Image (tube, rainbow, N blue to C red):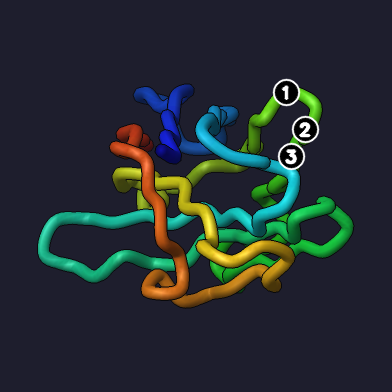
Amino acid sequence: QVQLVESGGGLVQTGGSLRLTCAASGRAFSSYAMGWFRQTPGKEREFVAAISWGGSSTVYADSVKGRFTISRDNAKNTMHLQMNTLKPEDTAVYYCGQRGSRYSSPSLLPHEYDYWGQGTQVTVSS
């Protein structure tokens, strides 16, 4: 059974930084593309960043490009999201997701991810 656990969220001031971690277990982590999404109350889950199974390919939402960096450590079954120059509009619950099929490409679409963590709250104060 796949389990994803996010950590690293918190309260930070505008311009600050946070590093989120997604720890995975249950199957061969290195075979699956991963992604970060975020959600605020009353809104749909929004794509943030995604990374290929091997880590060589990444894609970002325009709103975070140049500020956020996604990475993964397949030896440790973890994925990270380094968030710099945070803005109040980055406030949300951040979720990590894992695609269901081996060696599939990173995706911007939430419905193409089969497994999700419980989320971690990020709050950026102005």
Categorize mark 1 by other alpha carbons within 10 Å: few (<14), some (14-19), many (20+): few
Q: Nearer the viewer, residue 3 or 14?
A: 3
x, y percent for residue 52: 75, 60
Q: Is residue 2 left or right of residue 43?
A: right
Under circle 1, the secondary element is loop
Cα distance between the residues tagged 2 and 3: 4 Å
Task: Name the kind of residue labelled 2 in the image.
Answer: Asp
Q: Secondary structure at mark 2?
A: strand
Question: Left of 11 or right of it: where is 8?
Answer: right
How far apart marks 3 and 1 lie (CA) works out to 9 Å
Contact flag, marks 2 and 3 (Cβ < 8 Å): yes
- Depth order, front residue of 106/122: 106
Tell me which residue sits at (82%, 51%) in the image.
55
Q: Nearer the viewer, residue 7 or 41?
A: 7
Residue carrying label 1: 76
Q: Position of residue 75 (x, y in %)?
A: 80, 27
Residue position marked by numbered label 2 in the rendering: 73
Q: Is residue 71 above or below residue 19?
A: below
The picture places residue 6, in percent across and down from the top left corner, at: 43, 31
Q: Is residue 41 left or right of residue 26?
A: left
Type of amino acid under label 3:
Arg
Q: Are marks 1 and 2 in contact (CB under 8 Å)?
A: yes
Q: Residue at x 39, y 46 (%)?
A: 95
Residue at which label 3 appears:
72
- Is residue 14 among the parts visible in the rendering? yes
Q: Quadrant of the N terminus?
A: top left
